[in-house]
Image (cartoon, rainbow, N blue to C red):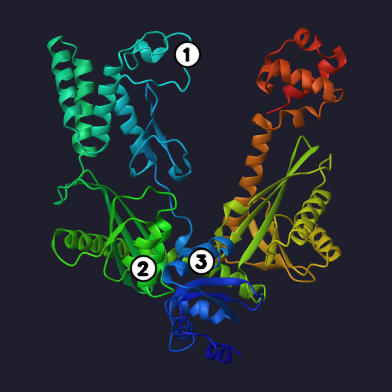
Amino acid sequence: MLKNKLALVPNLPGCYLMKNKDGVIIYVGKAKKLKNRLSSYFRGEHTGKTARLVSEIADFEYIVVGSETESLILELNLIKKYDPKYNILLRDDKSYPYIELTNDSVPRLAVVRNVKRKKNHNHLYGPYPNVVAARKTVNLLNQIYPLRKCKTYEKKPCLYYHINQCLGYCTYKIDQDVINKMKSDIIKFLKGDHSLVTEKIKSEMEKESSKMNYEKALELKELLDYINITLAKQKVEISDNIDRDIFGYYVNKGYLSIQVLFIRGGKIVERHYKIIPLIDNEGEELTRYIAKFYERLILPKEILVPDIVDNELLENYLHVSVKKPIKGTKLKIIQMANKNAEISLKEQFDLIQKDEERTFGANNELKEILHLDKLDRIELFDNSNLFGNFNVSGMVVFINGKPAKNEYRKYKITVDKNDDYNTMKEVIYRRYFRVLKDNLVKPDLIIVDGGIGQMNVAKEVLKSLNLDIKVAGLKKDNRHTTEALLAFDPIVPIKIDKKSNLFYYLERMQDEVHNFTINYHKQIRSKGSLASVLDNVEGIGPKRKKELLKRFKNLNNMKLASKDDLNEILPEKVSLNLIEFLKNYE
């Protein structure tokens, strides 16, 4: 069937979508010549993730477009829409923090992420290596320059004014020239020119030292050392001060290592690296990665890429200068990025292999033990109760052996007593009724954190919904640790070697769902749903609950309140009920 279908594919630019036997899209790619690219998957030998992908392909679709730029845009949109199993290159990439200098008449400094979402036109500088480095830089500048610290003006000077880190803009009129000079110095510093700040610190340090204020002088010296050692990063031999990002790569043993060097103010301020299994050819993978990379980052003035990348395609897509250096200093920097990509892969390879064994390997072993055709998605449930009569449930999801945190769900249970079976019945029904109603992705396996009783309840609910999904349970020993996997019909315990990757995988999943559910409890108890907690006190209805929340705001204030205070809102008997309830509430 596939061979006949391949014969009809044109050699035109476009996108292709690979599907498994259930019709689920498992990979999206693009090609200048669709027929050649699709044919390459079905001829010759493949290794690693490509071999796994090919083994699962049961069908494919393709979409012809007018140009390569259109195919890149379509490819990225399709990946975003379907989140295919094998397009892992574009998942879980970090967004770096930036430092923002606001455009207010009296500016503030702040650390921000998701810069593409910002609508105001403030000054943004970065990216920074991590949020800690960005905050340290902001704290450094705030110590040296007395900018405004408050988001809204206070009625009188705050602590920052009294420790000389603010000029008291809320109370005193400050000359705008003074503010503009500070702003100008800070902008120069954030663009990489540290000379003004270091001179200012040296001057202040000498002044404090001459006054024999050695403690303050030492503090200033430490600031100076921080700038010289931490912020004055490696200089490069390009003196035009243009902001550039440099991409390098290295391929070995079925993995693509990508290295990005950020050059700001003539210095390498940070690097980013990513190592992913290679499925497409390296040129296509790297071009796609660069296109996706700037979704959450500010584009530099220029991007330098290796010769395997389609720079013209990227230039049309990103609307920024993308160059492939062929000689000189810029080529040397590309080669440096390539070398760093090689070093990163060699350093990380053993860890990557072990992670593959702990995730994909263990997941595959579980699939074989349970005789499943595929095991891409597992949904796990745990129940917990508050005082025996306020129940909650949590669901976590593992996709291809790894937690998919954006898929986690919390449930407030309507059952008003400690009843594990009815709690399980309700949460399974609510979850999978919603799956049917909204046509959501069904899991290949459901795991309940409990024994045979909970499993039978889950099976009964699934049967009532005409859903055929395998159910397993995790049996605990008397020390509350995982002892065996429960499965099949009739249900039997399956002993798992406690030193195996599969055992650690099951234990990791069990810990994840348990912690997620317990944290939901803590949420309810701390800020949560104080109103829901008060529902457990006899004699407190909607009106009294509203008055208590308005008066005391939180449970801690309620605990500190006297009986007389409570009696102003509640009858004496109900006050005593609440006092007794709060006494046992930990």
- Residue extending farthest to the front is 66
Query: Which dot, 2 or 3, sits closer to the camera?
Result: 3
Query: Which dot, 1 or 3, sits closer to the camera?
Result: 3
| Residue appearing at x 44%, y 74% in the figure | 279
Residue 310: name its quadrant: bottom left
Q: Quadrant of the N terminus?
A: bottom right
Q: Is residue 499 visible?
A: no
Q: Position of residue 572 (x, y in %)?
A: 85, 12
Q: Who is closer to the viewer here, 417 or 406?
A: 406
Alpha carbon distance from label 2 to label 1:
53 Å
Q: Locate residue 521 relative to residue 288 in the image: left or right.
A: right
- Label 1, secondary structure: give it: loop
What mark, if any, has residue 154 been given in the picture?
A: 1
Query: Which dot, 2 or 1, sits closer to the camera?
Result: 1
Amino acid under disc 3: Leu
Alpha carbon distance from label 2 to label 3:
23 Å
Q: Of label 2 and label 1, which has the lower sequence position?
A: 1
Q: Of label 2 and label 3, which has the lower sequence position?
A: 3
Residue denoted by label 2: 256
Q: Position of residue 469 (x, y in %)?
A: 74, 68
Amino acid under disc 1: Glu
Q: Residues within 10 Å of mark 2 (few under 14, many from 20)?
A: many
| Residue appearing at x 63%, y 51% in the figure | 408
What mark, if any, has residue 74 been given in the picture?
A: 3
Q: Are marks 2 and 3 in contact (CB under 8 Å)?
A: no
Alpha carbon distance from label 1 to label 3:
50 Å
Q: Who is closer to the viewer here, 389 or 105?
A: 105
Q: Quadrant of the C terminus?
A: top right
Residue 472: name its quadrant: bottom right
Q: Is residue 453 visible?
A: yes
